[in-house]
Image (cartoon, helix red, strand yellow):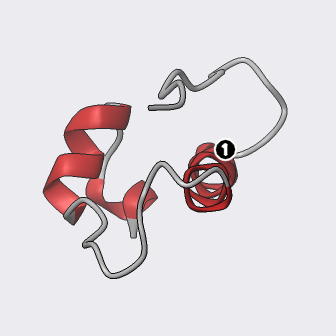
Amino acid sequence: MLSNKLNHSKGEALYLQIKDVLIKRIQTGAWKPNTLIPTEQELIKEFDVSRTTIR
């Protein structure tokens, strides 16, 4: 799976960094068609961010 490390000192918002990671996972085939993406709670744990950021 692609890196889940976020750059907190980068000028880009965390939610945009997460969006980019999720898009790359879809584009690279890390998530196959017709499979579920991780739940909100799983993403919160993986990226170590708040629920608001994930939403």
Q: Is residue 19 above or below residue 30?
A: below
Q: Is residue 35 above or below residue 26?
A: below
Where, by quadrant of the figure, is residue 29 drawn?
bottom right
Horizontal side of 20 relative to 35 (left or right) equals: right
Residue 21 position in % (x across, y down): 60, 45
Residue 27 position in % (x across, y down): 67, 59
Say what amino acid the circle numbered 1 marks: Gln
Residue at image x 41%, y 64%? 32
Query: Is residue 49 or residue 28 the one in the foreground?
Result: 28
Horizontal side of 26 relative to 43 (left or right) equals: right
Q: How many marks?
A: 1
Residue at image x 26%, y 46%? 44
Q: Residue furthest right?
A: 11
Q: In the rendered image, which residue does mark 1 sit on?
A: 17
How crowded pointer 1 is (Cα within 10 Å; few <14, some 14-19, many 20+) is rated as some
Q: Is residue 17 above or below residue 15?
A: above
Quadrant into which the C terminus falls: bottom left
Residue at image x 39%, y 59%? 54
Horizontal side of 54 relative to 3 (left or right) equals: left
Horizontal side of 45 relative to 10 (left or right) equals: left
Residue 23 position in % (x across, y down): 64, 60
Quadrant into which the N terminus falls: top left
Mark 1 residue element: helix
Where, by quadrant of the figure, is residue 35 drawn?
bottom left
Q: Residue furthest bottom?
A: 34
Q: Is residue 51 above or below residue 10?
A: below
Residue 19 position in % (x across, y down): 62, 58
Where, by quadrant of the figure, is residue 33 drawn?
bottom left
